[in-house]
Image: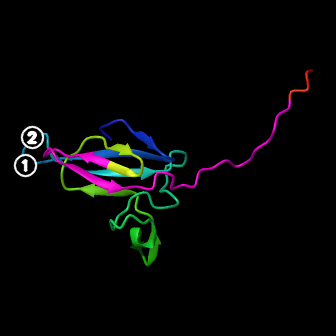
Amino acid sequence: MVTQNQFQGSALIGNTRIPDASDPCAPSGRGVIMSIDPFTGARLVETFFDINGDSVFNAGDLIEIDGVPTVVSGLALNTGFSNPSFLDKKMYIPTDDGSISTLDINPFSTGASRTSWRELINTGN
């Protein structure tokens, strides 16, 4: 990881960077945006990235590993990039060539919610 990790919803987002080996002085390369469960380090339970670009988060955004539909943990880009910015359910990725890539995201993909509730009453004691 070369940039500071950041939370988006209940996912931890981190970036990797693989420099361009043909010119070690060039600030370009490629990298991967990772989305993981911040408490276990494992992949998320539900998809975070809209892989197929249809703005719907479903089985179409999964990949198959040994015949098992699996949530994608990382999104590889063929260009270098900086930390993404987030607005609502969109991720904006500034790339080394000056363009900005946009991707729909599912920021609450791990299903975090209130697990219990209890009313506390002050009885004056």
Residue at the image point whose x is 40% and y is 62% from the top: 72
Q: Residue furthest front?
A: 88
Q: Is disc 1 in contact with disc 2, using a CB cutoff of under 8 Å? A: yes
Range of the magenta residues?
92-121
Q: Position of residue 63 (x, y in %)?
A: 39, 70
Instruction: For mark 1, give the secondary structure.
Output: loop
Q: Position of residue 1 (x, y in %)?
A: 33, 41
Report the quarter where the C terminus lies.
top right
The residue that label 2 is drawn on is 26
CA distance separating discs 1 and 2: 9 Å
Residue at the image point whose x is 19% and y is 56% from the top: 78
Q: Position of residue 95 (x, y in %)?
A: 20, 46
122 left or right of 72? right
Q: Quadrant of residue 53?
A: bottom left
Q: Main secondary structure of the magenta part?
A: loop
Look at label 2 and name its amino acid.
Answer: Ala
